Amino acid sequence: MIDLSNLEIWFVTGSQTLYGKEVLEKVQEHAREIVQALSQSPEIPVGIALKPVLTSPDSIVKLCAEANADNRCIGLVVWMHTFSPGRMWIAGLNTLRKPLAHLHTQYNRNLPWSTIDMDFMNLNQSAHGDREFGFLATRMGLKRKVIAGYWKESNVIKAIATWARAAAAWHDAQRLRIARFGDNMRHVAVTEGDKVEAQMRLGYSVEGYGVGDLADCVKEVTDAEIDRLAAEYDDTYDVVRPLRRDGDRRQSLREAARIELRLRAFLEAGGFNAFTDTFEDLHGLAQLPGIAVQRLMAEGYGFGAEGDWKTAALVRVMKVMSAGLSGGTSFMEDYTYDFGQPASKVLGAHMLEVCPSLAEGRPSLEIHPLAVGGKADPVRLVFTARSGPAVQACLIDLGNRFRMVANELDVVPPDEPLLKLPVARAVWVPRPSLEVAATAWIYAGGSHHTSFSQALTSQHLADFAEMAGIEFLNIDGNTRIDQFKEELRWNDAYYSWRA
């Protein structure tokens, strides 16, 4: 499982020596109080480390270098309590490689109208101190998140928490290794992409392996290991009769357990936290990994089917962002539509690989034909996703840039029981409607594979895209096609100019 508690944000306060020792001590005291309050918030998933007030170019350079070198530090939250001349920050910020959030707040909520004097004014200057920093960051073209409001307010704390989750995912992506068993599904366009550019831009690396490499590992599993995992299946899921201990398909369950054990061992030995496979490349495997993929995703691994390494990476990114939150995150595909009333719906699924973290109730462990791939019937978990708000996203390679496309959704129950559908699934109504959302998605070039989450919001994804410096498009309840097409045109012009 993913644990974010060992990571931390550095809280950095800016000032200058002009104000004297007494004022600087008060600035540090106020910063300490803010950090203590934020650290006690259950919404913020990482630690918050208070740093000394920075008052000189040398101290800023030193702190930025230390942040770059500290593996626990995932980003900086900066606040100008007083006026901190922007030019002091140039050298340090030029070297900073960690995400940056600019908190525009002040220590006091209200002005002491009857007693306010110049001492108070000189101490509480963030109203223009932060604007000086904001100009400097804009002048330098820095990617950053700006959060404005009083530091005790829930919306400010929520914004910091959302940014912190995106920063944790960015931190993880810089070390992410993706194992790719086989190649892309043949002739498919959207799952292709520039892996070198992805590593340069997004941090993660994609390593290719033959399915035979995994098959060789599968052969090494002992009967005792298979027995233990099969028993875990029996205890955890509603196992259909043919797969039970006395069932005539029990050997298929044991083969699925064998694949899970060695797939897990392969990933752990290689330091991989995401992977892909494809039903067209199964040499040496008796069945396409089904329950193995589902259970590994439930533990936090990223996955993409048919060689889709970009989606595997995004699933991992969203798994990290959602760690500790209620609601699941999974690989997903828009499979088929219901153009019904009062609203058109999407039935999302895949051949096998939807994460049980989405499940409403206890999943059923079943075996059914796959109808493609020419292999034995695979074992998989079958369930329906719980109802509630969700977001799906994809990452596509447009040649001159990466683009992330997101759509806000509402998951709903199926209109009728899906008695003959032998796969895990979710039914949802896209915002603002299927017709508008699908039109916008297609104009944007969005892929059929997505990462789907009932734990995250589009803001988590927007913050991550900002850190990565990639294009972000969100389809929500306010989307209009004419405006969306205009945004696409402006973005094309912007990125063509940058190139």
Image (tube, rainbow, N blue to C red):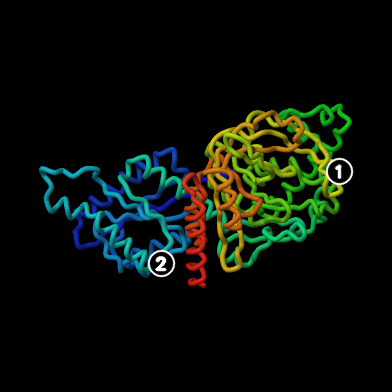
Q: Residue 5 at x, y = what percent?
A: 50, 44
Up the image or down, 91 lies above or below 453; here it is below
Up the image or down, 341 lies above or below 374; here it is above
Distance (Cα) linking label 2 and label 1: 55 Å
Mark 2 touching mark 1, by CB under 8 A?
no
Q: In which quarter of the image is the N terminus?
A: top right
Does residue 319 appear anywhere in the picture?
no
Q: Is mark 2 on a helix, strand or loop?
A: loop
- Residue type indicated by callout 2: Gly
Q: Which residue position is annotated with label 2?
A: 141
Q: Reading the chain from its start, which is encountered first: label 2 or label 1?
A: 2
Q: How crowded is mark 1: few (under 14 residues within 10 Å), some or many (20 or more)?
A: some
Q: Residue 248 at x, y = what percent?
A: 89, 31
Q: What element carries label 1?
A: loop
Choose between 254 and 423: the one closer to the eye: 423
The residue most toward the right is 248
Choose between 485 and 10: the one closer to the eye: 485
Residue depicted at 66% across the width and 37% down the height = 356
Query: Is 339 placed left or right of 18 in the picture?
Result: right
Up the image or down, 407 lies above or below 388; here it is below
Does residue 484 appear anywhere in the picture?
yes
Query: Is 89 placed left or right of 401 in the picture?
Result: left
Up the image or down, 472 lies above or below 362; here it is below
Residue depicted at 86% across the width and 36% down the height = 251
Residue 376 is tagged as: 1
Residue depicted at 33% across the width and 66% down the height = 136
Query: Is 137 placed left or right of 71 in the picture?
Result: left
Image quadrant where residue 249 sits: top right
Q: Residue 358 at x, y = what percent?
A: 62, 37
- Residue type indicated by callout 1: Ala
